[in-house]
Image (spheres, rainbow, N blue to C red):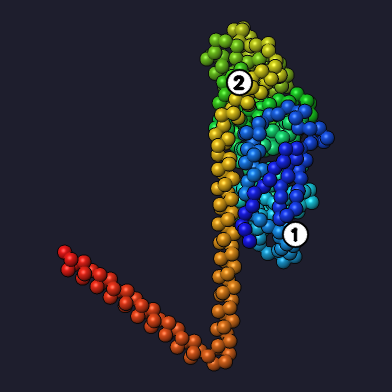
Amino acid sequence: MALCKTALTFRSTLSRQLLGSKHTYSVCINGVPKHARRTFLSDAYKGTSAWRTRRLLAVNMDELKIMLDANFFDLKKPVSSIDLHKFIDNVSDEHQLQSAEQYLYCHRHSPMTNHLRASTVHCYIRTCIDLGMSDKALKVLKDKTNYGLFPDNFTNNLLLGDYLQREDVRGAATVAMEMMRLEILTNDEHLSQLLSLYACHQYLKSGQNTQEETHDLGMTFADATRGQTSLLSRSYHIIGLSMAGRYKEVAQVLQSVADGNKEPCVVNEVIERLQGEMENPTEGNQETISNIQDLLTRLQAEDKILAESLDSLIISETLPLIKEVEKNHSHLKMYPLMLEEWHKEHIEAVKNQIKAAQDHERSIKEQKLEKLLEAVGGIKYWTEKEERRRQEEAKEEERIRELETGDLQTQAEKH
């Protein structure tokens, strides 16, 4: 049986031919065609073509599901990471996706949990997106204890971008906050920072955020703008730190911008938000609050506060920058290579799995033979057979040494 096959694509629908049957992914979301919504990430960045035409391990999904159900639910046996991956990489409908979620849960609570493949995490989340079920991916992503999915920035970006494209700002901001908790919103991942900043801005603007989310939302703003020097980034960095209650850091940033900038360095919305949050200072931070108020007064006196709104800056700065960064992103070239490398790893894993099964079967047969010989008094036969084998091996080694010695003598004679 061939170990791999290629995913097929069509113009109006995303389809894949698996084991002789066609499975179709819808390209509409809640009845609204994708082209009718704002596109945040291009197909080139998402590697849509490479994803749809990637090589898959050929499997019989019905047989594989029977085996996984038996091992996970009935026998409580550990399942190899490659068997789990084979199923998830070939999921094509909601029913199979539900089974995949259950398998991820079981795998997380098995001795094999540390062997979950990065390719499996990526495939599960990307398949959820393809099937229009990003909420299922987000549910699993948030529950680290029971599922243990830790996707990379690229996979998180795909999920965040999908939520933004569907104008679900709560979902997008939730993905951004997950990246903050994983500490992967860094300067090295500027696209993740930009997407997260946009998502959290829209979420805060919508008024859907809860009091319980204030700290994490603030820290996401802070991480999404850390190391950036634009007016927008500096303003939201201060807002984020204040939302997280890190007033000493707010004072440090304000002091730095007051001393080091001659032009406007924050927008007026920052001042208004800080003044509102500092109306009722606690006993422990009264001195820091007083210092912040003095710095705000200084910024106003030195005309370093701009009246432009954060919303207008988000539109004018962040959206064009997202396009620019993704267009030049190294992942454009890396993703197809990564998919191919993953496939090679999967092929090798299947080969090793087959070899291990064959070795195990051979070992069982040898054990049965040994027990049979022992039962019928065949130990002498077995011992003599082993002795003859060792003698033959010794003779073969002696012939090889003689040949090597003769070859050396011939070479010496030639010289």
Height in image: 124 above or below 228? below
Residue at the spot of label 2: 234
Looking at the image, the residue that sits furthest to the right is 31
Q: Choose between 15 and 118: the one closer to the eye.
A: 15
The residue type indicated by label 2 comes to Arg
Rendering coords of residue 210 (x, y %): 77, 31
Query: Residue visible at 28% across and 71% down?
Result: 404
Q: Identify residue type, mark 1.
A: Asp
Looking at this view, is 400 or 217 the one in front?
400
Q: Please identify the quadrant where the N terminus is shown.
A: bottom right
- Please rate how many residues cluster around mark 1, counting C-alpha atoms within 10 Å: few if below 14, some from 14 to 19, many from 20: few
Disc 2 residue crowd, few under 14, some 14–19, many 20+, Cα 10 Å: many
Give me the disc on residue 366.
none
Which sits earlier in the primary sequence, circle 1 or circle 2?
1
Residue ID at (55%, 57%): 348
Residue 332: % across, % down: 58, 35
Q: Quadrant of the C terminus?
A: bottom left
Asked if residue 114 shows in the view, the reply is no
> Judging from the image, what secondary structure is the residue with disc 2 in?
helix
Any mark on residue 62, and which? 1
Quadrant hosting residue 251: top right
Q: Label 1's element?
A: helix
Left or right: residue 120 versus residue 97 is left
Q: Residue at x 75, y 59 (%)?
A: 62
